[in-house]
Image (tube, rainbow, N blue to C red):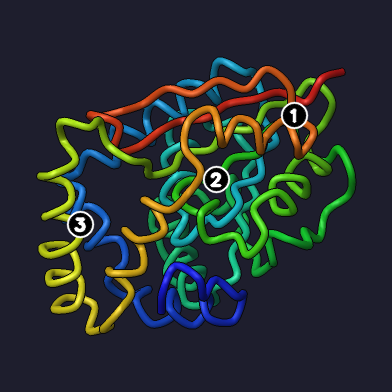
Amino acid sequence: MTQHSKSRSNVATMFNQIAPKYDLLNHLLSWGIDKRWRKKTIDKLIDSGALSILDVATGTGDLAIAAAKRNSKFKITGVDISAGMLEAGRVKVVNEGLASNIVLLEADSLNLPFDDHQFEATMVAFGVRNFEQTVKGLSEMFRVTAPGGIILVLEFSKPDRWFMPLYGIYSKVIMPLIGRIVSKHSTAYTYLPETALAFAQGGEFCDLLVKAGYSKPTFTRFTFGIATLYTAVKEQ
């Protein structure tokens, strides 16, 4: 699979295949720093005052679970196209005692099965780059966000220029090798860093948020620019 094969069926199939080892590899390949990035995202979510939340491309529910553990008043609906990832996520939700806070559903980000203005906040971590149509997916998130609500997008990005040579070796050689050995999938951990580097960055992605309807987009880069948190609001 290459950065060009982002059809719904291809992405779902790939994530179904790597689901059993997905969490292990996420934390291993990021040296655990991904947990810190999620914490920063949840800090923004808490500051927004939102309580009803949609987590798009939830995967195994890492962001939803971390958020619900921070605030027991959160009611979070997580959606994903991968049944395998959701199955793993539901086990985690039950094990964490969060079944009353989190519901995980199979759904397509380009056609969300929710009413207009249903959620006070929408969020997505490391999933937007896998949308088959980026603006359409963001527009669907805009549609289901209530006026005054917030969107939070945590995504991989191009690192600072001085860090690129090291990151290039890691993402093009070490990450695919470890990913292939652990996940038993031949191309998933080549595809994932490819999509990160090819994806819209910084102000370019903020322009996509505006195109989808959002206002006041901002972004904050983490860990030499390896990841970026974008926020924007749906005006009243």
Mark sitting on residue 214: 1
Residue under the image location 70 percent in, 35 percent down: 52
Indicate the amino acid at tag 3: Ser
Kindly identify which residue carries mark 3: 171
- The N terminus: image quadrant: bottom left
- In screen coordinates, is 26 left or right of 132? left
Kindly identify which residue carries mark 2: 124
Q: CA distance from mark 3 to mark 1?
A: 32 Å
Of label 1 and label 2, which has the lower sequence position?
Answer: 2
Who is closer to the viewer here, 75 or 232? 232
Q: Quadrant of residue 145?
A: top right
Residue under the image location 58 percent in, 50 percent down: 102
Of label 2 and label 3, which has the lower sequence position?
Answer: 2
- Where 141 sits versus 21, above or below? above
Residue 221's spot in the image, x, y percent?
36, 26
Circles 3 and 1, Cβ within 8 Å, touching? The answer is no
Circles 1 and 2, Cβ within 8 Å, touching? The answer is no
- Where 195 sits versus 182, above or below? above
Indicate the amino acid at tag 1: Tyr
Q: Nearer the viewer, mark 3 or mark 1?
A: 3
- In screen coordinates, is 141 left or right of 23? right
